[in-house]
Image: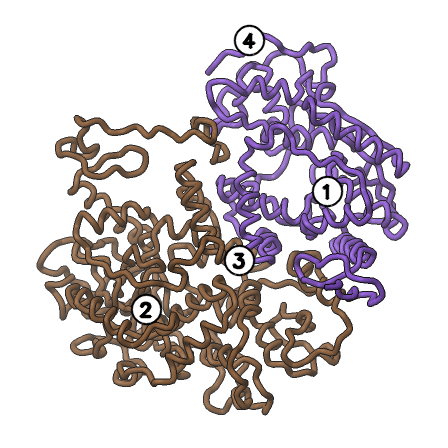
Chain colours: A brown, B purple
Amino acid sequence: MCQVGEDYGEPAPGEPTPAPRPSREQKCVKCKEAQPVVVIRAGDAFCRDCFKAFYVHKFRAMLGKNRLIFPGEKGLSQDSAKRLRFVPGVIFVDEGAAFGKSLEERSKTLAEVKPILQATGLPWHVVALEEVFSLPPSVLRCSAQEPAGSEGAYKAAVDSFLQQQHVLGAGGGPGPTQGKEQPPQPRLDPQSLASPPAAAQPEALSQLFCSVRTLTAKEELLQTLRTHLILHMARAHGYSKVMTGDSCTRLAIKLMTNLALGRGAFLAWDTGFSDERHGDVVVVRPMRDHTLKEVAFYNRLFSVPSVFTPAVDTKAPEKASIHRLMEAFILRLQTQFPSTVSTVYRTSEKLVKAPRDGPAAGDSSPCCLLCMCALDVDAADSATAFGAQTSRLSQMQSPTPLTETRTPPGPCCSPGVGRVQGCGQGACRREDPQACIEEQLCYSCRMNMKDLVSACPPAPGQAWGRGKAVPSRGCWQILWPLDTGLCCSPHWTPCRRTSWPRPSSAHRGTEAPTAVACGAGASGLVPTAAFSLGPGSCRRSGTV
Amino acid sequence: MPAPPCASCHASRAALRRPRSGQALCGACFCAAFEAEVLHTVLAGRLLPPGAVVAVGASGGKDSTVLAHVLRALTPRLGISLQLVAVDEGIGGYRDAALAAVRRQAARWELPLTVVAYEDLFGGWTMDAVARSTAGSGRSRSCCTFCGVLRRRALEEGARRVGATHIVTGHNADDMAETVLMNFLRGDAGRLARGGGLGSPGEGGALPRCRPLQFASQKEVVLYAHFRRLDYFSEECVYAPEAFRGHARDLLKRLEAARPSAVLDLVHSAERLALAPAARTPRPGACSRCGALASRALCQACALLDGLNRGRPRLAIGKGRRGLDEEAMPGTPGDPARAPTSKAVPTF
């Protein structure tokens, strides 16, 4: 009784569906010759080779259908007519510091990961999560890149994917610039990225995570930091795309989780195939059609190495966070109604990247500082859920004097137009940087920020150049490199997303490298595909 | 340890903590705050203009009881008049007791009450008869699908009989959150596109409907009923355990335990969902049989009844809607001359 509109063929709830077991004599449904080794979906048995072909075909079809990955060079390489015409790199984010792991444990993990990365033969990068604190201001300026979206240049030849192994790692390494033709772009000195993090930074990171009250907010924070770090690496090394290994199951869980977190407006960006909210770097999810079972079986059948690293929610009880709850719920419901994940996936395909009503936001609408989505908050007094939350607090607030450390009862300035409108009330003239920051966040990021309580003493308020004490040092350290509009510091000029230079037409035709991937999978059990695409396939003709 | 003083009046002892904000309030201040918030929802959303005749869907349960009570307290402020409309679905052992509660409330509040029965409106089909008809061959019964559609039709009919201009129902924030979870899990893109707002404005001749308690959490509704000592019927419908909504409800309770703001976060998500134009409902027309609002040739109620009458209860619930264009049996719903069908249901 799960799907609306579907003929009710399932038995009454409570009785498990007897799955039709393939009989011993049944052959692979595709080639009808070999013995099947794995059952996909509801009873399709595949043999080893057909399964591989099926898996690879799905991957190619996903890339080809969406026409976002551009070929690198014009000519065909020697080996095969159907090669993936982009060159990926692989990135691994070492998040050990966030969980308080010691340096030995982290280097042990890295030692396991590096051989896997080296074995792929692709350029690899290792970066530690605490480097997000030292992101230079140039992270906000995108390099002059070829836009990925010129329709005419796409060619439909997508390559065999067999060499792309699904690995969990990334390796740090020297900048992969030798021998590549690239459009000139401002580059960071690769040495500065490869240097080991300063001793204080892992401490700061671990303290930041300890100061977060709920596991939900921790997971969201981790995701935000990781995303920004990967984007930075992508920009620094000239990649234009980031591929993540989210499978169908994971995306269904992520969609429902984001729904529960208040991100209903951004579901299409969070779980769709491509995510262009960061401007020059596009996040794509080519594995979104593969279920977790298919990925796991692929890894097992073809001996794809993987490394398990504990994540922030490892061994956490089920009700510790929204993410865990939703994962357990979906997986449990899936056993009872086997079409749950595919139903949610199909619904997610119907989502569009537009605000519900009103004209398309375009570049002029304000964006959330943390997640870069257009703000989705309403006026404080409107008849909406947001209004209900804020107006209730402001109405019933007991008349005690507001201290600097207290969260203000609600944004007194309408954030709808992205500007702090002076409303003349005393609260507004408070110059509370926390309130001003909150007004630049979307609904769900505000909810998460409420759980970020600082355990560190406030730093002298040089961050804002206003001489006020900042309440939460940890928060500001995150938001410092991310803020695109509020900064008044003389060090760097505010740089909104819209002001990034558009690439010139001289670069048309050369493929901008696309970088990828997400490092440590959340529970570590499923290796995430990590590869990035870069130009210069000429230098590695035999590899890809 | 004595309770802290009320945070609002500072006079009496606090009797509860509000579930979401954790604020300690005494009973009277809490009820005042609750009523103020409902008033704010109605005014800010411009739901009930002055002079409206408002039909309150009263089921005898906590939500509609609280709704009727609050609206009655707010009628001088809003300038509206209230009518109670109760629906008798014909569920034995459940609805009779609930209706008795509604009658007591109507007498106490001196509000006019109208009862509409499925049996009269829909050609003798009570929910028990529908359940019998859809049972069999081990399939899940989907009674709630029938009941929901038919009840809305019945409510509309009852509202028309009393000359109402608006219909209000007692859905609270938890109901809205469960609905969006349920619709996602079932892949109901049409309902996802329609829901999430403040109710429907009433296009195509249908009466505008709204839910003034939309942002009140279920816990607060119960607390309000407790502090105002309201008499309501609190048992669960006999068919409720079979409903899919139970899964969504279970999930919502756990989410709320993990994060108290989850309910309003879900409502916010529902408001902001952006679905593809193809998934949105087509322009509404009129049902060819009864004239009610419909997006296809037959409104859903007529389609469901059609299926029941033909002995093929799943006719309107399947994806293909096959067979709907076949020759229909004579007699329209609501025809008093029609006897309830008691012949054996052929199995499919």
Marks 2 and 4: which is nearer the front?
Answer: 4
How far apart are the alpha carbons under marks 4 and 1? Answer: 39 Å
Q: CA distance from mark 2 to mark 4?
A: 67 Å
Amino acid type for the residue under numbered disc 2: Ser
Same subunit under labels 2 and 3? yes
Q: Are marks 4 and 1 on the same chain?
A: yes
Chain ID of residue with mark 1: B
- Residue topped by disc 3: A261
User: Relative to the observer, which residue lies in front, A313 or A81?
Assistant: A313
Count of marks placed on residues: 4
Residue B341 falls in which quadrant of the image? top right
Along the polypeptide, which appears first: circle 4 or circle 1? Answer: 1
Residue A515, percent from left and from top: 29, 67
Image-quadrant location for residue A414: bottom right
Residue B344's label in the rendered image is: 4
Q: Are the two marked residues, 1 and 2, in contact with CB atoms closer than 8 angstroms?
A: no
Chain containing mark 3:
A
Q: Residue at x 55, y 20 (%)?
A: B134
The residue beneath circle 2 is: A240
Q: Describe residue A142's horizontal placement relative to residue A268 as left or right.
A: left
Question: Mark 1 = which residue?
Answer: B63
Q: Chain of mark 2?
A: A
* Marks 2 and 3 close (CB-CB < 8 Å): no
Residue neighbourhood size for the residue with mark 4, other residues' Cα within 10 Å, grouped as few (<14), some (14–19), many (≥20): few
Task: Please indicate whether residue B52 sits to the left or right of residue B124 in the image.
Answer: right
For marks 3 and 1, give the CA distance. 26 Å
User: Percent position (x, y) of residue A388?
Assistant: 69, 59
The amino acid pointed to by label 1 is Asp
* Helix, strand or loop under label 4: loop
Residue positioned 16% across, 57% down in the render: A163
Q: Is residue A81 left or right of residue A246?
A: left
